[in-house]
Image (tube, rainbow, N blue to C red):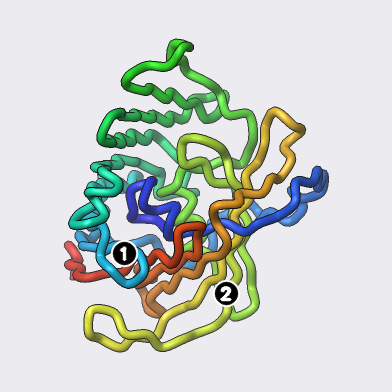
Amino acid sequence: MFGQIKPLAWLALGFSVLPSILLADWRSSLTPDTTGPFPSIRPFQAEFRIGWTDIEAARAHVKISTEGSEVLRLSASGGTSGLARVLWQLDASLDSTTSRNGFRTIYSLQKENYASRSIITQIVSRPDGIWRLRENNPPGENAARWKQIKISPLRDLFSGMLFIRSQNLRPGESVSTIIFPGDSPFLVEMKSLGIERITVAGTARDAIKLDIRIHRINLKMDDRLEEHGKFRSGTVWLSNDADRIPLRAEVDIFIGYVFAELESIVFNNP
């Protein structure tokens, strides 16, 4: 779900379990690399709460802004809290920019700080494609280096979610695209299940319900799709209005039920 820092966002997206297969024709299922008819997102600031088995476990602050007329920017930060922080300490941030025309990734800087280690991931678009630098502290045996991600069309998490949001999303329609959050590329498939009324932050709202399936793409094995056994299924609800803001996400993973939910939002241009 766009607007979340990556370590928390992927909990909100969910993974399906799929036997490892070649599926040489999976590319034919990709949605054409053209943004849909839905208007671009309005700048806003929002707070999200993230929980595990109905208990709040983390919080995230999200800001979407513009840089001139051609660039959208996401700034997000958050971390675990309460009992969850005792079990898993995490503070993270994501700063990402994308082109308003086509939602093409420009640059992304992601920081993850755990109890005993940290990871800094940079994603940058160059004339020859998307490149990634992933630095660990303490460092591993091999020195960190820039690596080209040789698959396309490819977008980072922010650009990818904006691309999906722009599509029609009529009941029964699916969107399939490749998203690169910084570690591995994933085939992300979202199917619209129709309109559902849900209550978020004490207010009942109509929402577009999306079923999510995500498969890892193994670039070293002829772009084979692989299972991710820790993640099982996911659902996201977008507001069914002119803004299409993420209202809630739920995912069933190996440790149980995890959710992310909008708590408050302020638009910079009402």
Query: In screen coordinates, is 90 left or right of 246?
Result: left
Give the structural element (helix, strand or loop) at label 2: strand
Mark 2 nearby-residue class (10 Å; few <14, some 14–19, many ≥20): many
Q: In the rendered view, tell whether residue 162 sits above or below residue 197.
A: above
Residue at 33% x, 44% y is 71
Q: Amino acid at mark 1?
A: Gly
Write down the residue under mark 2.
192
Front residue (pair 81, 151): 81
Query: In screen coordinates, is 28 left or right of 70?
Result: right
Write down the residue under mark 1.
51
Front residue (pair 256, 3): 256
Q: Earlier in the sequence, mark 2 or mark 1?
A: 1
Quadrant into which the N terminus falls? bottom left
Contact, CB < 8 Å: mark 2 with mark 1? no
Give the structural element (helix, strand or loop) at label 1: strand
Where is residue 24? Give x, y as percent.
82, 44
| Cα separation between marks 2 and 1 | 24 Å
Residue at 30% x, 34% y is 111
Residue at 52% x, 21% y is 147
Quadrant of res 68: top left
Where is residue 191? Give x, y as percent.
60, 70
Circle nearer the viewer, 2 or 1: 1
Q: In the rendered view, tell whether residue 219 sits above or below residue 189.
A: above
Where is residue 114? Give x, y as percent.
28, 36
Residue at 28% x, 68% y is 55
